[in-house]
């Protein structure tokens, strides 16, 4: 599904190059659940952003379903990104001014899905995540765990093939964290490929594979 | 999708009330100003368009050369009308007319005085008033009159005015042959309440009868309608030398020309034989002011939106990760700004409706919002869209460029130059405000300067009445005695024309030492004994006219500038030849302002002439209250002149009216300056609140390190003061340039002194400090522990 070859990411300041990622190569098969671990500044988030097409590598090759992402530009890239990838963040990143329902609806709007189908999908996911009662609340009326729940619901509403989660449990206490991880595991079992970044050894174990990063290199 | 965008923005607006208020309120005020100015410009541009033959009507004017420069007059000789009609096939209609003059109209017990014109019979057909009764041929008979609807109502109430008899100036009876709807307020003929026959006029008025075949008696107006497809300029060239080709061409070298109706109102000024515009300059100036003020409001919107960008950045990031393309975000921000501008438009319509009466008052207009005019809505909506697009352009392009990775990781900080456009816009905004303040101060200084000028006589308690009917003139001596006997009148005299205006001038005057090829124009004033005492003029040399000297019927008094023009060292007893008669100079009086208070006083002379008098001047004695005095005077006039209504004018009020135009400009400029400053301050207020918020952490740290309130206040205010200071540097030379140009319109004018700029600078700096301080002091006094904990 994903193949990256010798990805590098560095910032140049004059003649000085500051490396974030060095010579990263990785294969991800469909249906995998990968946990990326490593200390602060090791480049975990950067890999995630590159995989999510939010950031571009300085060098190297990136194939997504055999398409060469590193040669793609603007529209095509955004097309690929919005139809295949869902994001989950540590800070949830819901839109404060929109209700739960409207937040869930937003990605569908960007995919130009028609009204009836859209309403059906939102209703279905509200039901599936058991948050129907909360659909008219604003994010600041929800607890952290509930917000993350909505954020995950929003990430998967358009049926992405890949979910990228950047420390999804980082702001939650352990009980809530566990619930979120169970949910991700369930989604994985239903066929969604998941790549998460985490600090927690416990939650890393949910993955089928753990990749450890240090100073921009893959340790194992 | 659009719903999603608008919902976000609507909730945003509700959440940030101050921000929304500044944004929408500011934009609404800007739009209101633009709309009011737009209505005003519309009104000015549509002037005279009421007349159906708008594109073919012209008034005949002439350039004359009295000395060095050509001056322009619309006063013309009567025979020119017939000449144009008979010998020039280019003209469809020609009519000689009087000026719009005050006439007493009597019908039964009703007596009114109204202004109107005596015209030849083709005049109504040319000017196309809207007829209620009768036709355009109503002036065919000599004893006929066409009256306006309002005059008909005033004279006959609900009775039918047709065929009713009206007596004019107690001299002639005329029959009403037509009633027309009053000319609209934006017509040059708005104060023409009746049209009467020219033949009747020449039969009643001795001078007009005499002037009927005189080519050098320039005292009448001529209007003409050109045939379809005839060029005004070419025709002007053809009629130019009519007089000069005749026998005995006059020394002032008249050149006739046509001034087309579509230029009367806006292009009324001539200088040395060239049209130099006129009101159009003001229309353009305020047109620009309107656009600039709207721009100010749009700038506020841009500034506040981008200042808010750090808050909005997260939303941009999220939307991008959810699959939004940049173009969709651009669309989102534009639809947001359009939402704001639409709300602002609604608000603007309300404010405009409330503000229009006030504005009409200062602009002396009668404008209304054109609710039913589709063109108005088209422009209003176009403006709304334009404002939305301008206001939304910068945030749309700027905010949509954020990279999601950066903003979502919380590492987003606007770059060092992110605030630069904001600063440039702020400088632009304040430059306009400063320029408007300087402009307002200059206009008012100029007005007060001219008002402060010594007028050469005393207008306090001075009233004048025009003698339309023959009764007053016949009984003048008895009236004068009776008035003085009332005890409320200090002095009475007669004159030809009002003291507030120059009545007419002559070039037919010569004196010892006059250079033979110069024909300067001297203003002639025909007065009676006691005139000087009545108006309180100042004799500088020699003596006043006096009944004690039988020879004073051939005596002349000069004003100072006439004395200077003639170049006499010892003017007394010099002989001046005028109208075929020798006059001896017996005195010199101080210059009296009869023309424009912004111009030098014209050389003038005074002679005694009882038969020409048409105005009575009365000086009230200062002991009696004005109301009581007027009652007693009215009794005297009723006795001798029952045919005329008792009407009088205070000279001081008439003199004050000379400043109307300038005061209107001043008030308009002031009005716009205040709104511009208001809008700018709203923007500044919003901006400081953001800056203070942005720097909360920095302020907290500084306070922990020992900074006091004053230090923090300085830190935050300094930057804004610097920007305002730059605005002063930008605005001052621009304002200097424009105001200097404006002042050059006036002969008698102030110098642009430095203090004017100083005052403007000081007031803007003060306003800035006050605006900025509200937030800076709040930020400076906040508890640092709190602000640091939030981070």
Image (cartoon, coloured by chain):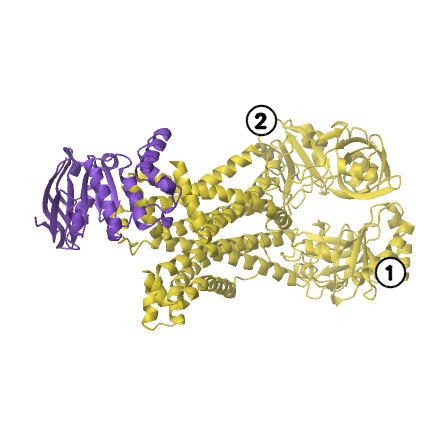
User: Which of disc 1 and disc 2 is earlier in sequence?
Assistant: 2
> Residue B401: which quarter of the image?
top left
Q: Residue B380 carries which label?
A: none
Residue nearest the viewer, comparing B194 with B438: B438
Q: Relative to A72, is B506 on the left or the right?
A: right
Chain holding disc 1: B
Q: Name the residue under label 1.
A: B550
Q: Where is residue B292 in the image (x, y as percent from the top left)?
A: 47, 48
Q: Nearer the viewer, residue A3 or B101?
A: A3
Q: Which of the 4 image quadrants contains residue A153?
A: top left
Q: Which residue: 27% across, 53% down?
A: B410
In the rendered image, residue B773, in percent from the top left (x then y), is placed at 45, 64
Per the model, the C-alpha gap separating discs 2 and 1 is 62 Å
Give the numbered dot on residue B229. Answer: 2
Mark 2 is surrounded, within 10 Å at the Cα level, by few (under 14), some (14 to 19) or many (20 or more) other residues, namely few
Q: Which of marks 2 and 1 is in front?
A: 2
Q: Is mark 2 on a helix, strand or loop?
A: loop
State which chain is coloured purple. A
Residue A148: x %, y % from top left: 29, 46
Q: Residue furthest left?
A: A220
Quadrant of the drawing holding the N terminus of chain B: top left
Tell me: residue A63, above or below residue B640. Answer: above
Element on which disc 1 rests:
helix
Q: The yellow chain is which one?
A: B
Q: Are marks 2 and 1 on the same chain?
A: yes
Q: Do the residues labelled 2 and 1 touch (CB within 8 Å)?
A: no
| Residue B659 in view in this figure | yes
Identify whether B411 is placed above or below A190: below
In this rendering, would B282 be left or right of B523? left
Q: Which residue is drawn at 73% across and 58% down?
A: B652
- Residue A190 is situated, as x and y percent measured from the top left of the image, at 21, 35
Query: Which corner quadrant holds the C terminus of chain B?
Result: bottom left
């Amino acid at each position: 599904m994903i193949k990256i070859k010798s990805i590098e990411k560095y910032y140049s300041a004059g003649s000085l190059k500051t490396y974030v990622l060095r010579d990263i190569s990785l294969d991800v098969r469909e249906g995998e659940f990968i946990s990326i671990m490593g200390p602060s500044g090791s480049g975990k988030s950067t890999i995630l952003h590159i995989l999510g097409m939010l950031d571009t590598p300085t060098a190297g090759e990136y194939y997504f379903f055999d398409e060469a992402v590193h040669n793609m530009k603007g529209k095509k890239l955004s097309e690929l990104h919005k139809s295949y990838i869902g994001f989950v963040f540590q800070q949830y990143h819901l839109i404060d001014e929109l209700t739960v329902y409207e937040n869930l609806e937003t990605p569908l709007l960007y995919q130009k899905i028609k009204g009836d189908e859209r309403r059906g999908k939102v209703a279905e996911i509200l039901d599936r995540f058991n948050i129907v009662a909360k659909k008219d609340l604003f994010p600041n009326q929800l607890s952290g765990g509930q917000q993350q729940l909505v954020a995950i619901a929003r990430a998967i509403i358009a049926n992405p093939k890949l979910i990228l989660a950047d420390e999804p449990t980082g702001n939650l206490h352990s009980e809530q964290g566990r619930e979120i991880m169970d949910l991700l595991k369930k989604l994985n079992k239903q066929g969604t490929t998941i790549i998460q970044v985490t600090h927690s050894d416990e939650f890393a174990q949910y993955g089928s594979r753990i990749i450890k990063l240090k100073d921009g290199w893959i340790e194992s | 999708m659009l719903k999603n965008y608008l919902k976000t923005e609507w909730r945003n607006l509700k959440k940030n009330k101050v921000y929304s208020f500044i944004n929408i309120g500011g934009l609404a005020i800007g739009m209101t100003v633009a709309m009011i100015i737009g209505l005003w410009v519309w009104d000015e541009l549509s002037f005279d368009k009421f007349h159906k033959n708008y594109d073919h009507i012209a008034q005949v004017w002439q350039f004359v050369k009295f000395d060095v420069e050509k001056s322009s007059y619309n006063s013309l000789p009567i025979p020119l009308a017939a000449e144009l009609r008979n010998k020039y096939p280019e003209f469809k209609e020609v009519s000689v007319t009087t000026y719009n003059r005050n006439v007493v109209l009597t019908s039964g017990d009703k007596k009114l005085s109204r202004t109107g014109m005596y015209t030849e019979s083709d005049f109504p057909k040319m000017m196309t008033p809207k007829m209620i009764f009768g036709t355009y041929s109503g002036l065919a008979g000599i004893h006929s009159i066409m009256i306006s609807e309002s005059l008909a109502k005033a004279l006959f109430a609900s009775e039918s005015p047709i065929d009713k008899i009206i007596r004019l100036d107690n001299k002639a009876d005329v029959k009403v042959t037509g009633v027309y709807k009053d000319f609209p307020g934006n017509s040059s003929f708005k104060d023409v309440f009746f049209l009467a026959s020219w033949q009747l006029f020449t039969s009643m008025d001795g001078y007009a009868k005499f002037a009927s075949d005189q080519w050098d008696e320039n005292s009448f107006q001529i209007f003409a309608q050109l045939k379809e497809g005839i060029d005004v300029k070419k025709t002007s060239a053809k009629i130019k030398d009519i007089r000069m080709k005749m026998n005995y061409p006059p020394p002032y070298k008249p050149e006739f020309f046509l001034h087309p109706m579509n230029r009367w109102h806006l292009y009324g000024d001539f200088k040395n034989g060239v049209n130099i515009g006129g009101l159009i300059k003001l229309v353009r100036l305020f047109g620009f002011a309107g656009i600039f003020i709207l721009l100010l409001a749009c700038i506020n919107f841009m500034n506040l939106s981008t200042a808010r960008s750090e808050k909005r950045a997260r939303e941009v990031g999220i939307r991008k990760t959810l699959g939004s393309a940049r173009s969709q975000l651009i669309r989102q921000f534009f639809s947001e700004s359009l939402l704001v501008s639409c709300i602002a438009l609604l608000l603007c319509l309300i404010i405009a409706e409330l503000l229009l009466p006030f504005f009409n008052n200062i602009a002396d207009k009668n404008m209304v919002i054109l609710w039913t005019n589709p063109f108005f809505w088209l422009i209003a909506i176009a403006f709304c869209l334009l404002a939305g697009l301008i206001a939304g352009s910068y945030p749309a392009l700027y905010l949509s460029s954020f990279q999601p990775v950066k903003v979502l990781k919380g590492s987003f900080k606007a770059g060092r130059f992110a605030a630069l456009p904001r600063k440039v816009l702020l400088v632009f905004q304040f430059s306009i405000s400063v320029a408007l303040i300087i402009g307002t101060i200059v206009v008012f200084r100029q007005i007060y300067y001219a008002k402060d000028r010594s007028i050469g006589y005393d207008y306090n308690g001075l009233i004048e009445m025009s003698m339309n009917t023959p009764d007053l003139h016949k009984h003048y001596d008895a009236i004068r005695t009776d008035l003085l006997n009332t005890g409320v009148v200090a002095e009475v005299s007669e004159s030809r024309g009002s003291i507030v205006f120059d009545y007419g001038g002559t070039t037919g005057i010569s004196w010892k030492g006059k250079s033979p090829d110069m024909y300067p124009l001297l203003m002639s004033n025909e007065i009676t004994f006691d005139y000087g005492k009545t108006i309180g003029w100042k004799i500088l040399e020699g003596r006043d006219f006096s009944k004690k000297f039988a020879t004073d019927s051939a005596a002349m008094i000069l004003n100072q500038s006439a004395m200077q023009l003639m170049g006499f060292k010892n003017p007394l007893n010099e002989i001046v030849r005028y109208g075929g008669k020798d006059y001896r100079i017996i005195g010199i009086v101080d210059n009296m302002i009869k023309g424009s208070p912004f111009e030098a006083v014209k050389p003038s002379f005074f002679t005694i002439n009882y038969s020409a008098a048409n105005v009575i001047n009365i000086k009230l004695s200062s002991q009696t209250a004005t109301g009581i005095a007027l009652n007693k005077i009215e009794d005297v006039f009723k006795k001798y002149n029952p045919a005329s209504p008792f009407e009088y004018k205070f000279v001081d009020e008439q003199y004050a009216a000379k400043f109307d135009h300038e005061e209107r400009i001043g008030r308009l400029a002031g009005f716009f300056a205040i709104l511009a400053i208001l809008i700018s301050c709203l923007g500044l207020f919003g901006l400081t609140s953001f800056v203070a918020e942005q720097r909360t952490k920095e302020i907290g740290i500084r306070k922990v390190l020992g900074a006091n309130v004053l230090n923090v206040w300085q830190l935050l205010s300094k930057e804004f003061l610097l920007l305002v200071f730059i605005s002063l540097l930008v605005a001052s030379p621009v304002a200097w340039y424009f105001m200097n140009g404006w002042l050059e319109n006036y002969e008698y004018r102030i110098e642009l002194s430095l203090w004017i700029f100083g005052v403007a600078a000081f007031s803007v700096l003060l306003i800035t400090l006050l605006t900025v301080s509200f937030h800076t002091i709040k930020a400076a006094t906040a508890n640092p522990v709190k602000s640091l904990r939030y981070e």
